[in-house]
Amino acid sequence: MYFINGERILFYSDKLKFIDGEYVAGEPLTSIWDDILSNNLHNEGGVEFPKGKKPEALIKRCFDLATKPGDIVLDSFAGSGTTGAVAHKMGRRWIMIELGEHCHTHVVPRLQNVIDGEDQGGISKAMNWQGGGGFRYYSLAPSLLQQDSYGQWVINKEYNAEMLAQALCKLEGFTYAPSDQHYWMHGSSTESDFIYVTTQTLNAEQLQALSDEVGEGRSLLVCCGAFRGAAERFPNLTLKKIPKMVLQKCEWGHDDYSLKVENLPKAPTHPSPLPAGEGVEKSKGDKNANPAQAGLFAGDEQ
Ligand SMILES: C[S@@+](CC[C@H](N)C(=O)[O-])C[C@H]1O[C@@H](n2cnc3c(N)ncnc32)[C@H](O)[C@@H]1O
């Protein structure tokens, strides 16, 4: 080390690094990154999020280090949506989860601007971001089951008959499509296999009437509160009790809740329009949209 008058002398040649074919001045990266503070942080993404927002450049550095294009990035605390915005601009797929109203007020508008190419802040210039891609926006329904004051599992009071039928269709792999003609046709899995959802207790007479209506060439999954009579008397009916059948689908006390993503239903080729205010499906520039993104989730948005 060389010193003059108490000052250390460093040689410029020692600071040069050979990067991408040329010598540039540089220091090895330390664990303190003070080179990427954003002067314009409060404006990034066009949304305000005091004390919670991270600079896009900071998140970009993390993704540069830890991910490659096409990877899926998860942020279960979306906040102002920085993670998704940066992942999107860098060609990564993303999943964000948010508990608060930020979904409607911050995340969705921000990502819409990213997709439309209107967000030119943050890392947009560095990525030459022009827009493209898309996302799906789902709101989580309330829990289907809850325990009553005796500790018994019952259907959540927030569920009306329609919501219950929709939920059980999803759980049992049926497409929800209630029929105008048959009260018992709430959905189908094939042209001849149907599902009926009711909280009633069905007696033997009612089951016989159902079985007669369903007839020989069709089958019906009956999800009901309870039933009386011998189930095997009706070969075209499969009988299940609602709280029990849902509980059987739940996993309790596991250390490993591995999500079998490959078993989720495929996204529709031509998705139907979403009800206003319930969900958003945005896309622009199909060349940029990643088809694998659509494969994660499918079906309706609730
Ligand atoms: C500090 S902010 C995240 C900031 C964000 N990564 C960004 O850079 O903009 C934390 C967010 O997590 C949300 N949150 C807290 N608990 C949650 C939970 N259990 N599930 C989902 N979101 C949650 C809060 O509402 C808040 O918006």
Image: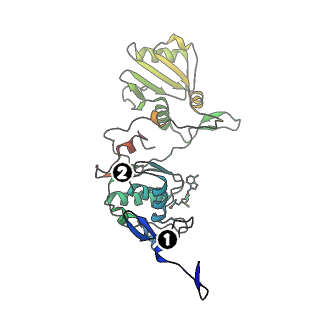
At which x and y percent is residue 80? 48, 61
Which residue shows up at 38% across the image and 53% down it? 91
Residue at the outermost bottom position: 5
Q: Secondary structure at mark 1?
A: loop
Residue identified by numbered label 1:
35
User: Image point 32% across, 54% down: which residue?
Assistant: 132
Drawn side of residue 223 relative to residue 188, left or right: right
Task: Give the number of the mark in front: 2 or 1.
Answer: 1
Instruction: Residue type at mark 2: give it.
Output: Gly
x and y, in percent, of residue 230 in the image = 56, 12
Question: Hey, what amino acid is under mark 1?
Answer: Asp
Is 9 in front, or is 263?
Answer: 9
In the rendered image, the vertical position of residue 189 relative to residue 264, given as above or below: above
Verify CB contact (< 8 Å) between mark 2 and mark 1.
no
Read off the residue under disc 2: 134
Residue at the extreme front: 2
The answer for how far apart the CA atoms under marks 2 and 1 are is: 32 Å
Binning the other alpha carbons within 10 Å of mark 1 as few (below 14), some (14 to 19) or many (20 upward) gives few
Disc 1, ligand 1: is the CB inside 8 Å? no
Q: In which quadrant of the rendered view does residue 154 lie?
A: top right
Q: Give the image location of residue 42, x and y in percent.
A: 47, 71
Towards the viewer: 106 or 184: 106
